[in-house]
Image: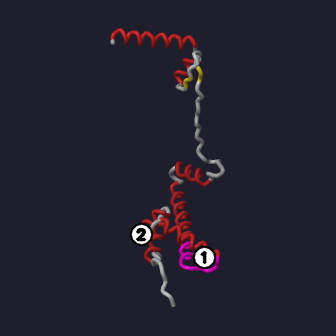
Amino acid sequence: MPAKRGQPVKLNPDTKARLLLALRAGNYRYAAAAYAGIHIDTFMTWMDRGRKALRSGTPDMFSELLTEVEQTEHQAEAEMVLIWRTHMKNDYRAIRDFLERRHSNTGKWSRREVIAHEAPVETPDGATVADPFCKRLAQNPEALAAYGDLLAALDREQTSTG
């Protein structure tokens, strides 16, 4: 029987236990992988290998890991939601946040943000301004003329004293 080639697989009981522990605590996969001492790419490769093994009907250690990872993530999420719900009795923000996230795809409870966009206004002399103060000036020719006179007076004062 020929010897197996390549690097030994880092998936061992200790690595698996550390991965599942970190995931059960609610960590993201990249953080769980780092905690277990492996790179996230290695972890994702194992998940891909597990999916392929399940599709082909030949379960192996990677498909077992995939199943346990998914179960652990679902369990952690359910536990976190339960903890979150306990705060709803005393804090309206917990209710609001729960509903925002629970119904984020419907928009029913999502936050509504208003983004204002002010289009530039053209002044009588053809200049374009976007500043709100300048817009008001541009829409009032008398105020614009008075502001222009003020700037000219300040400019004269500065050049005469300068």
Residue 1 picture location, percent across and down:
51, 91
Q: CA distance from mark 2 to mark 1?
A: 24 Å
Point 51% across, 50% down: residue? 91
By secondary structure, the bulk of the magenta-drawn segment is best described as helix
Identify the image quadrant of the C terminus. Answer: top left
Regarding mark 1 in the picture, which secondary structure is present there?
A: helix
* Labels 2 and 1: the sequence-earlier one: 2
Of the residues shown, which amino acid type is indicated by label 1? Ala
Q: Give the residue pinned by disc 2.
A: 37
The image position of residue 134, as x and y in percent, is 53, 21
The amino acid type of the residue labelled 2 equals Gly
Region rendered in magenta: 56-67
x and y, in percent, of residue 148 in the image = 49, 13
Specify whether residue 125 is painted magenta.
Answer: no
Crowd rating for badge 1 (residues with CA inside 10 Å; few <14, some 14–19, many 20+): some
Residue 91 vs 127, above or below: the answer is below
Q: Which residue is mark 1?
A: 53
Residue at the bottom extreme, as displayed: 1
Residue 112 vertical placement versus 41 (above, below): above
Residue 12 in view:
no
Front residue of this view, candidates 89 and 52: 52
Q: Are marks 2 and 1 in contact (CB under 8 Å)?
A: no
Of the pair 104 and 139, the residue shown nearer to us: 139
